[in-house]
Image (cartoon, rainbow, N blue to C red):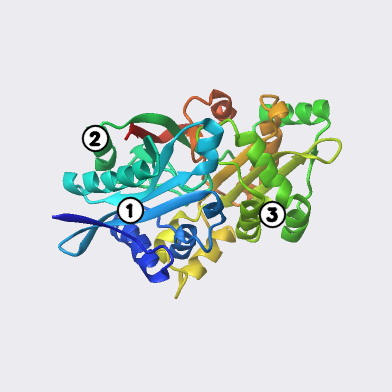
Amino acid sequence: MITVSPINQNSKSELKKYVKFGIDMYQGNQCFVPPLIMDDVNTLNPAKNPAYDFCEAQSFMAYRDDEPVGRVTAIINKNVNAKNNQKYVRFGFIDFIDDTEVVDALMKAVADWGRERGMERMVGPMGFSDMDHEGMLTFGFDEMGTMATIYNYPYYPKHMERMGFESEADYVEYRIKVPEQVPEKYARVAQIVQKRLNLKVVENKSRKFLKDNYGRAIFDLINEAYEPLYGYSTLTPKQIEYYIDMYLGIIRLDSVCFITDENDQLICAGLSMPSLSRALRKSGGKLFPMGWYHLLRAIGGKAPDVDLLLVAVKPEYQNKGVNALLFANLLPSYIAHKYNYAESNLELEGNESVQKQWDMFDRRLHRRRRIWGKNI
């Protein structure tokens, strides 16, 4: 018999068990990349995550004979629902053994919880905001994941289809070969774009310089550029401060590029990072005793690949070649560090303008993922 119980989200020990279950599920799997346990615990903790200012959430664990066999978190993002005039409950952080009874019980818990609060449709996997992991893997199960993506077993989407879920949004991911030099045509386009639009590439003097001068502007730009995308949750001032502290303190200066207009206003931001996939696998999601060592080595550039975490371009500058200027400035660093590949991470399948930026590179589509939806 399956029982589903709510997690006390104010209990660090219960949240830790919940997060660790999602890691233990993949023990021995060579493609799974664990999150940092402390990061997921903080994300699920109402006292730590500023998204709780406008979100309501409840995490559930499924048990059989007192043994954990599944987990899921139900989330209502009130801001997105109000913006889109919808009544959606999200499900995220979902993991389960290959058992119909287990997954049915988990999804029933989400549906019941959402219905009690007036929701009419469930969608996921999604987090509180787009800064959280989202999208269930549907293709590429034999490819190692990244720190920014979800890994799941092939039976996950089969259960979603069995339960009558349909596609809400589909994403593609590319593995891009880092060239030995900046392609001549790419460099030429970059020069033309910079001159024609009178753009300037910011000199990355220090992390403090970027944080003080561009920290808020980066996330304001992300809000503006990503606003039209599926399910986007506009970051609040409180969230922005939270993510400035989280990310800008660990970025490599040669892995980011910011572009301004003639008035020094930020119009493009590109953030990348040496891949932490292998370091996270070695750490098992833990910083101690040796996890910090593996992560610091990777952040220091001792990684074979690079992750493209995000690219944001001000709407009026999109489709004007600004991305060429961005990567013409990032590629020399990638080449110097001898990165083999760059991971694009999630791109909406229908966003052809984003995918066209890889046309000049040797790349392959190596993962697909989906956000599922179903009326409740």
| Position in image of residue 235 (x %, y %) | 61, 46
Amino acid under disc 1: Gln
Local crowd size for mark 3, using a 10 Å CA cut-off: few (<14), some (14–19), many (≥20): some
Are the residues at dot 1 and dot 2 in contact (C-beta closer than 8 Å)?
no
Q: Circle 1 sits on which residue?
A: 30
- Tell me the CA gap for discs 1 and 2: 29 Å
* Element type at mark 1: loop
Judge the density around disc 1: few (<14), some (14-19), many (≥20) Cα neighbours within 10 Å.
few
Q: Are marks 3 and 1 in contact (CB under 8 Å)?
A: no
Q: Position of residue 319 (x, y in %)?
A: 66, 24
Task: Write the residue at 50% across / 49% down.
Answer: 55
Task: Name the residue that disc number 2 marks.
Answer: 163
Q: Is residue 198 left or right of residue 5?
A: right
Which residue is the site of mark 3?
253
Query: Which quarter of the picture shows residue 329?
Result: top right
State whether residue 159 is above or below residue 279: above
Report, in whole angstroms, how far the alpha carbon at label 3 lies from the one at label 1: 31 Å
| Secondary structure beneath label 3 | helix
Whichever of labels 3 and 2 marks the residue nearer the N terminus, that label is 2
Quarter of the picture holding the N terminus: bottom left
Q: x%, y% of residue 44? A: 45, 58
Q: Residue at x 64, y 41 (%)?
A: 222
C-beta proximity under 8 Å, tags 3 and 2: no
Give the mark nearer the N terminus: 3 vs 1: 1
User: Can residue 208 be seen?
Assistant: yes
- In the rendered image, the residue lying farthest to the bottom is 289
